[in-house]
Image (cartoon, coloured by chain):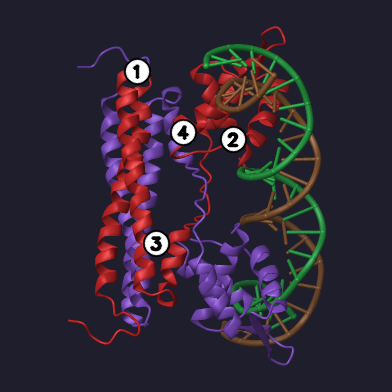
Chain colours: A red, B purple, C brown, D green
Amino acid sequence: MSRQSQTEIAVLGALSVEPMSGYAVRAAITETLGHFWSESFGQIYPTLSRLETEGHVVRDAVGQTSGSTFRLTRSGRSRLVALLHEPIAAAPPRNGTLLRLFFGGLLGPDTCAEIVTAARDHALVLLGTMTEARAAIVAEGRPDAAYWLITVSAGEHAAKAQIAWADETLEVLRRLPHRGLRSGS
Amino acid sequence: MSRQSQTEIAVLGALSVEPMSGYAVRAAITETLGHFWSESFGQIYPTLSRLETEGHVVRDAVGQTSGSTFRLTRSGRSRLVALLHEPIAAAPPRNGTLLRLFFGGLLGPDTCAEIVTAARDHALVLLGTMTEARAAIVAEGRPDAAYWLITVSAGEHAAKAQIAWADETLEVLRRLPHRGLRSGS
DNA sequence: CCGAGCATGTAACACGTTACATGATTGC
DNA sequence: GCAATCATGTAACGTGTTACATGCTCGG
């Protein structure tokens, strides 16, 4: 499985929750899968067209007005389950924050501390989002709530780890010699 | 800054440690930055050519035999520092494991447990790699050791968080009802 | 009536990997 | 001599985002 089918999973998956328009698929992915997945219109519409051709989704046109609603067919559901079973292609790692910190000797402790603080702030926001998401899922009481909460928990663990790392790192940076500074303590 | 310059950071950064061939740049990125960065030959060689044209690196040809060694010029060093200062473009999230678990209701607890176990195993391997990396860096005693260790620490925190999440999740999955199973307790 | 949001789609571009072609060097 | 590794490069392909074009609907 190349990456294309990953987009297919996201689209079919969104439609498996309930039928909706392509525009709504995008919104659902952004809002609900936002912390671990993303798709753009440029991917979603061609994918929907292809899935329609292949008979995995059908388009319920409402007059001609106001777009159409895509619905998963039985074959689409099978396809989704099959794709979910396929091995997971690991994405090549690309962490811009760590790339910069690795060469932190060229930046100095203060600039590095700013970078780490930004990462910490970002994680903090994420943690807040996760708390809200958790509450929303529990409140809605969907049948798949347990699985949805698993992904929320992953976000929380990751965010907390990043905050702990940031705090530890800021402490390390504070003890590092500042270039051009004579002594101080 | 688009993404191109991120590749430029990695290449210039590798050469900032010491002059080397393009082939060695690739090896250095894979081995040393491997847990948070990756580049392929198809990116590295064109980037080196461009950097040479722009005067950021020079090629010390050794006869004609056995390739050449690329060395950072003063302008290349400035360029690297400038790039390191630029804002970090957040990569769109794409976590195949969480994508599958979110739709775990279609897979059932057992298959999900396999996926989570695979993620746990992967994190465990990563943790081992980090421990080795830490030892190697300390042993080498490079001047930038402190910065390199910061990135190792990030890997350790992330790996430990993933293991903790996996253990918690496996417990959750164990308590979940198995489809088709009548009662049990 | 007008702006905001809903809705669909495509074309251009950027990015990155993979596979291939090619050849030198080195150790066995 | 042969295989493995070092070394450089490119072409093809897949994937993904961004920006644009277009039009509807609905609330104020």
Q: CA distance from mark 4 to mark 2?
A: 12 Å
Q: Position of residue A104 (x, y in %)?
A: 41, 72
Q: Which residue is mark 2?
A: A7
Query: Is residue B139 something one can see in this rendering?
Result: yes
Q: Residue A33, labelled with which disc?
A: 4
Say whether residue B122 is left or right of residue A27.
Answer: left
Q: Earlier in the sequence, mark 1 or mark 2?
A: 2
Vertical comparison of A1 with B155: above or below:
above
Q: Earlier in the sequence, mark 2 or mark 3?
A: 2
Q: Secondary structure at mark 1?
A: helix
Q: Secondary structure at mark 3?
A: helix
Pointer 1 local density, CA inside 10 Å: few below 14, some 14–19, many at least 20: few
Please name the amino acid that badge 4 sits on: Leu
Total marks in image: 4
Q: Earlier in the sequence, mark 4 or mark 3?
A: 4
Discs 3 and 1 carry the same chain letter: yes
Residue depth check, mark 3 versus mark 1: number of the one nearer the observer: 3
Query: Is residue B125 something one can see in this rendering?
Result: no
